[in-house]
Image (cartoon, rainbow, N blue to C red):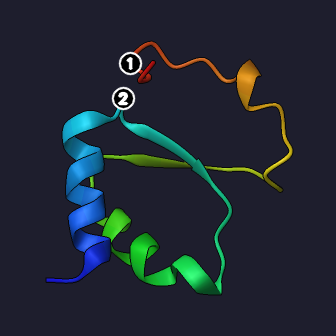
Amino acid sequence: MKASNLFVRSLEQKSGGYILGVPGEENLDFLEYLKGSKIRLMLIRHDQNKIGDFECPNAMN
């Protein structure tokens, strides 16, 4: 089992169902496992976007 798979499983158990991210070469394996997950990827243009404006009722504190 790959680390990407374990990471997605952990997120499924602990997250509110959404993650924010920028797809890239470095995380393609993680994104492949995420496709089959109940977690939704919210694409952002770059990591300096206003993440504080994003509201998710089930988000972790």
Q: N-terminal of the two: label 2 or label 1?
A: 2
Circle 1 — which element?
A: loop
Q: Name the residue carrying label 1.
A: 58
Q: Residues within 10 Å of mark 1 (few under 14, many from 20)?
A: few
Task: Give the quarter of the image for residue 59.
Answer: top left
Give how far across and how far down residue 40 sits, in percent.
44, 46
Whether residue 54 is situated above or below residue 30 in the rendered picture: above
Determine the residue positioned at 24% across, 71% down: 5
Determine the residue positioned at 45% across, 12% down: 57
Determine the residue positioned at 41% across, 73% down: 30
Question: CB of mark 2 within 8 Å of CB of mark 1?
Answer: yes
Give how far across and how far down residue 46 sits, in percent.
82, 56
Amino acid marked by disc 1: Asn
Side of 38 where 41 appears, left or right: right
Give how far across and how far down residue 42 sits, in percent.
59, 46
Using the numbered discs, state the Cα–Cα distance from disc 2 to disc 1 in whole angstroms. 4 Å
Task: Give the quarter of the image for residue 4.
Answer: bottom left
Side of 35 where 36 appears, left or right: left
Side of 54 where 38 appears, left or right: left
Of the numbered discs in the image, which one, if any, rests on residue 7? none
Side of 24 where 17 appears, left or right: left
Where does the N terminus fall, quadrant-wise? Answer: bottom left
Q: Residues within 10 Å of mark 2 (few under 14, many from 20)?
A: some
Of the numbered discs in the image, which one, if any, rests on residue 16? 2
Amino acid marked by disc 2: Gly
Which residue reaches farthest top?
Answer: 57
Circle 2 — which element?
A: loop
Give how far across and how far down residue 16 sits, in percent.
36, 29
Determine the residue positioned at 30% across, 47% down: 11
Where does the C terminus fall, quadrant-wise? Answer: top left
